[in-house]
Amino acid sequence: MDFEILKRVLAALEARGVRYAIIGAVAMNLHGLARSTEDLDIFVEPEAGNIDRLKLALHDAIDDPDIDDIAAADLLGEYPAVQYVPPEGAFHLDILTRLGDAFGFSELETERVPYEDLLVTAVTPRMLYRMKRGTVRPKDAADAAAIRQRFRIDE
């Protein structure tokens, strides 16, 4: 993970007023559970203006004309996920507006958490547990177990 790019992206999302929520391993790290990762997974509010602000924020953080290829139609369509890989560095960004029928942006439980000198929006530990507990990937099952134990989450 390129933490310099991560911080620039998060600062730009905040500066542009993007409505987003960090999920996945970065959210785990923000809540104090160390987990290695190579990407930043975020949910964004599925609204064209918000996606425009997302693209502006990415342009602020990364010099790459390919950011313009991120289309609101993709994020608002049948398969609402886009993976963006910057031209250099060990970092990529998975952008979602929903996870199938299971989770949409409006259903996410979020909170503001510190990351260095920023306050960022991440899903709560309980929400992260709900997102990871029923998946088929072994690392998600391990993540769910760690979250459940650390935060004493009852089913």
Image: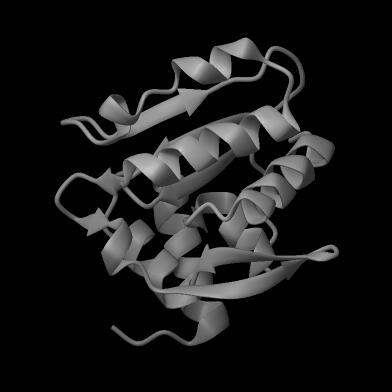
Where is residue 146 shown, x and y percent of the image? 53, 68
Q: Residue at x 58, y 59 (%)?
A: 27
Q: Residue at x 68, y 49 (%)?
A: 10
Is 74 placed left or right of 138 in the picture?
left
Name which quarter of the figure residue 150 lies in: bottom right
Picture quarter with the N terminus? top right
Where is residue 84 shown, x and y percent of the image? 53, 24
Q: Relative to the observer, which residue lies in front, 155 or 23?
A: 23
Work out whether 47 lies above or below 22. Answer: above
Work out whether 6 lies above or below 21. Answer: above
> How does the figure colour the protein chain or chains?
one colour
Q: How many marks?
A: 0
Q: Does residue 48 appear anywhere in the picture? A: yes
Name which quarter of the figure residue 32 lies in: bottom right
Q: Residue at x 48, y 55 (%)?
A: 20
Q: Relative to the observer, which residue lies in front, 133 or 24?
A: 24
Q: Relative to the observer, which residue lies in front, 137 or 10?
A: 10
Q: Relative to the observer, which residue lies in front, 39 or 11?
A: 11
Picture quarter with the C terminus? bottom left
Q: Does residue 38 appear anywhere in the picture? A: no
Q: Residue at x 34, y 33 (%)?
A: 81
Is 5 placed left or right of 113 in the picture?
right
View extreme (front): residue: 49
Where is residue 59 shown, x and y percent of the image? 66, 28
